[in-house]
């Protein structure tokens, strides 16, 4: 007997219908607005349209090596338009928002670049010598892209602090990345080592964690004003079924997939047929690029 397999229902391409009622937007950076640091077709015009319409939006990235002001300056040069750093949410700024919310006033040991550490201005961050004191009583340890500062001594300080009751926060779990010198060990590999030694999981602040979406939605809710923004009024536009679409759905947001980055039409079709793009990972709609999303969004208002 021949077994028949029902074809999976195709993902909707009616972006306008999927965005009816949306009052704020979260845009992924890589694969949606840019690739290799350069703007993707239609990205500059999309941002200009959102600004002209005074439409609340945030750009979210797992980049964590720099402060938002530094990152915005680089994007401005590449895109040829002003980019307000307050429009950006990074894994570092999300981590800073998390510690401000959950560890307000408590001493923190933050392993991050000197530039990214400025995200914690106004919070109580300690140096390695201060954090290593027996009476430090840290509220949280934050692990990010600190380069050579991710030393045995500093990781041991973090280990002891968490053993003594501090929370463990990680900007991401990326194992490695590519630099000008080639493949390079990333902070996530060390985070996993700490988790193993401590027998506990870190709170991760980058995508697809709810923490980064919470940081973005909190800011958007404040910007949007009255009537109060609901989570369902916000849509995430990304190029990754797991990190962007499923992450957005777990956070209570809508998820729109664009085919300008890591997911193309062929890989989307394969994901639909295999069942990977189901449940939370199934986008509410799929579009060619961010320009078509913004056009549909503004026409649906």
Image: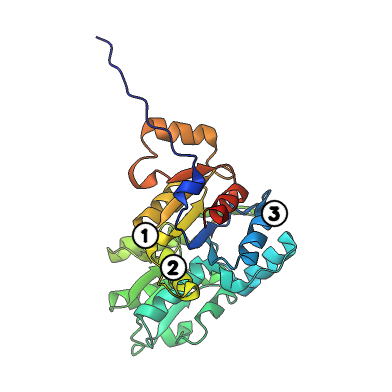
Whether the residues at callouts 3 and 2 have beta carbons within 8 Å, the answer is: no
Q: Quadrant of residue 197?
A: bottom left
Residue assigned mark 3: 38
> Which numbered marker is on residue 251?
1
Query: Which badge, 2 or 1, is on the more N-terminal residue?
Result: 2
Q: Position of residue 76 (x, y in %)?
A: 70, 66
Q: Is residue 150 visible?
A: no
Crowding around mark 2 (Cα neighbors within 10 Å: few <14, some 14 to 19, many 20+) is many
Neighbour tally class for label 1: few under 14, some 14-19, many 20 plus, Cα within 10 Å: some
Residue placed at 47% from the left, 82% from the top? 128
Callout 3: SS:
strand
Q: Residues within 10 Å of mark 3 (few under 14, many from 20)?
A: some
For the residues bearing labels 2 and 1, Cβ distance under 8 angstroms: yes
Q: CA distance from mark 2 to mark 1?
A: 9 Å
Q: Say if 243 sits above or below 123 in the image.
A: above
Query: In percent of the image, x 39 and y 45: which residue is there?
Result: 281
Q: Residue furthest left?
A: 1
Q: CA distance from mark 3 to mark 1?
A: 29 Å
Quadrant in which the N terminus appears:
top left
Q: Residue at x 43, y 50 (%)?
A: 245
**Residue 117 image point, x, y percent:** 54, 77
Q: Which mark is residue 135?
A: none
Residue underneath mark 2? 217
Q: Earlier in the sequence, mark 3 or mark 2?
A: 3
Residue plotted at (49% across, 87% down): 122
Q: With respect to residue 95, does 201 lie above or below?
A: above
């Amino acid at each position: 007997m021949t077994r028949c397999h029902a074809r999976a229902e195709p993902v909707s391409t009616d972006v306008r219908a999927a965005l009816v009622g949306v009052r704020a937007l979260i845009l992924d950076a890589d694969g949606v607005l840019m690739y290799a640091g350069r703007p993707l077709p239609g990205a500059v015009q999309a941002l200009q349209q959102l600004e002209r319409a005074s439409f609340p939006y945030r750009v979210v990235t797992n980049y964590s090596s720099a402060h938002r002001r530094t990152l915005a300056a680089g994007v401005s040069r590449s895109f040829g338009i002003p980019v307000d750093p307050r429009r950006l949410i990074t894994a570092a700024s999300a981590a800073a928002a998390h510690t401000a919310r959950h560890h307000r006033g408590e001493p923190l040991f933050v392993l991050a670049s000197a530039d990214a550490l400025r995200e914690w201005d106004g919070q109580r961050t300690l140096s390695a010598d201060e954090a290593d004191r027996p009476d430090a009583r840290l509220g949280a340890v934050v692990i990010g892209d600190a380069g050579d500062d991710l030393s045995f001594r500093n990781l041991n300080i973090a280990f002891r602090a968490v053993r003594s009751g501090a929370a463990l926060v990680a900007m991401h779990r990326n194992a490695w990345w590519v630099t000008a010198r080639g493949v390079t060990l990333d902070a996530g590999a060390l985070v996993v080592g700490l988790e193993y030694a401590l027998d506990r999981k870190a709170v991760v602040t980058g995508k697809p964690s709810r923490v980064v979406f919470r940081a973005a939605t909190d800011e958007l809710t404040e910007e949007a004003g009255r009537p109060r923004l609901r989570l369902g009024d916000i849509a995430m536009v990304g190029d990754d079924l797991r990190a962007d679409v499923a992450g957005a759905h777990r956070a209570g947001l809508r998820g729109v997939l664009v085919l300008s980055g890591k997911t193309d039409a062929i890989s989307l079709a394969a994901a639909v047929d295999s069942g990977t793009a189901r449940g939370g990972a199934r986008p509410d709609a799929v579009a060619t690029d961010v320009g078509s999303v913004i056009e549909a969004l503004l026409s649906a208002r």
